[in-house]
Amino acid sequence: MSCIGTCIGESSPTQVAFISKSMPRSGEYVTLEYDGKKVLGMVEGLVRGSPSISGDILDPGIVEKILGFEGEEEQYVRGNVKLLGGVETLEIPRIPPPPGTKIHRADSAVLKKIFGSGTIKLGRLLSHPDVEVFVDGNKMISRHLAILAITGAGKSNTVSIIVDGILKLNGMPVIFDMHSEYASAQFDGVKRISPKLNPIYLSADEFKILVDVGKEAYVQERYLRKAYSAAKEKVREGSKNFITDIISTLEELQASEEDFTQSERNALVGVINKIEDFESKYEGLVNPHVGDILDEFEQGVANVVDLGSVDEDYADVIVSHVLRKILYRRKNKKIPPAFCILEEAHILAPAFRSTLSKYWIDRIAREGRKFGVGLCLVSQRPKSLDPNSLSQANNTIIMRLVEPSDQRHVQQASERLSDDLLSQLTSLNIGEAIVLGLMTKIPALVKIEKFEGKLSGGDPDIIGEWQNASKSSKEKVEKEKKEVDELYGGMV
Ligand SMILES: Nc1ncnc2c1ncn2[C@@H]1O[C@H](COP(=O)(O)OP(=O)(O)OP(=O)(O)O)[C@@H](O)[C@H]1O
Ligand SMILES: [Mg+2]
């Protein structure tokens, strides 16, 4: 165990300053022995200096001279150690470490014991690549998870590693796949679920969004609700023409003797037009012949709801519909516990707009723990994500994040993200993550494992595609020229 520094100055039970001659790494684990205990800590806030090269020197020549004279020998490194707890119990000791306590690089054996006890493997410690990092699956699912990073940093890869881990435990992951990237992934069992909905199972609010009847269109809403429940009744009685049934109810109303005002008549015509638009827009998706989408979910496979070809309104309806029903069915113990993964969570649960999904995401964030429904919010724009839902995620995997406003937003939602860890977010490489929350005993800097089951949605080879296209178009021209030459025997 190599010594990397010595405690100096005033310490507290949770923090101590140190001085060192060598340069430890920020985020590195260290151990200190005092009060008869071995305590684990994390290196933070590193600064480096030299007593003879102070900040008020104005002539670079003087710096050169001092360096020539004394080399780098006199330089020091200062930093803090955040104390995480005794290596056995991880309880914070009551007594602060005394000045002069030696700080050692943590032993892999100690770290293996801490990170080896979880149920889902994420990857390896950045500072100790021989230490595998497992997290507590129960806590990850019941206390929800947020995966946040800029585009291309490795969010979908992390999702795949987690799904793979859940499947090894015979779990039930449900992925709302906004870009059709998971359906072809080689999980140990994957089921693509087509985004078709049977209108009979929809709520009136869900149907209203698809028909685009706005929030303030009360009269239109009244007629729509009337026609919608009449058509539902007819479908129950065996009708196969849901949309025609709605329109005919509305037309009957229009033709009735009722004493409508002009604005009521306009509203009726408006609803009929909207239903016709809805029919052409969602033809094939809303279909009275399909079963209940919830009956398609299975335990032990990745349930991928393919939303790659639907618009945002439709995605909102299907996500809220599925979340609502999963919560209800879990309350009645009709389905196994589920982990619902929402890609592009900032679209489904935006910060400054209300959507149906946002309501159900928020409900599951609050109630899901009791009923075994977990949420995983995945986003590249954390500042646009509903802060309520984000703050309910008691576990966070943060990868490279550059925008200060995104970083602040994440820090506000996760009290465990210290300023020092926050400052490291810009320097993380692809696949490197800060893992925080109840699912891990202590915060960790992790290199997430690469998912080998090939996921579409990785970085495309744009230049290669252009070149192939221009090569094949040149070949086509050559071929046509040759054919013309052969046909006219070189006469043209
Ligand atoms: N842990 C990792 N190890 C090695 N390569 C990785 C790792 N994570 C991601 N990559 C690679 O980086 C690329 C982008 O990863 P990924 O698609 O997971 O990013 P993303 O954050 O989901 O991006 P987007 O915001 O566009 O969805 C992929 O080609 C992937 O193979
Ligand atoms: Mg992705």
Image: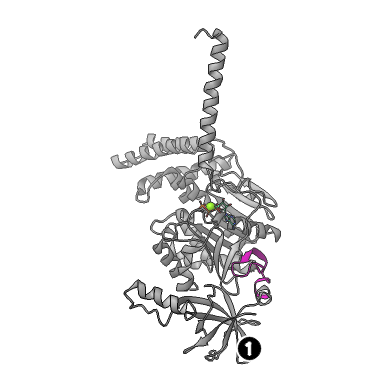
Q: Position of residue 374 (x, y in %)?
A: 58, 62
The answer to whether the beta carbon of the residue marked 1 is less than 8 Å from any atom of ligand 1 is: no
Q: Is residue 211 left or right of residue 377?
A: left
Report if residue 126 lies within the magenta region: yes
| Vertical comparison of 268 with 36: above or below | above
Q: Is residue 31 left or right of residue 265?
A: right
Badge 1: how crowded within 10 Å, few (<14), some, or many (20+)?
some
Residue at 63% across, 54% down: 451
Q: Is residue 30 left or right of residue 380?
A: right
Q: Residue furthest left?
A: 262
In this orientation, does residue 12 appear? no
Specify how the rendered protein is coloured. Answer: one colour
What's under tag 1, amino acid-wise?
Lys
Q: How many marks?
A: 1
Residue at 54% across, 23% down: 476
Report if residue 127 lies within the magenta region: yes
| Vertical comparison of 254 with 56: above or below | above
Using the rendered view, name the quadrant where residue 139 is placed.
bottom right
In this orientation, does residue 38 appear? yes
Q: Position of residue 285 (x, y in %)?
A: 53, 40
Nearer to me, 72 or 296: 72
Q: Secondary structure at mark 1?
A: strand
Q: Position of residue 319 (x, y in %)?
A: 52, 52
Q: Which residues are magenta?
A: 113-132
The residue to which callout 1 is attached is 37
| Vertical comparison of 362 with 9: above or below | above
Nearer to me, 432 or 259: 432
Residue at 43% across, 35% down: 276
Quarter that holds the N terminus: bottom right
Nearer to me, 61 or 280: 61
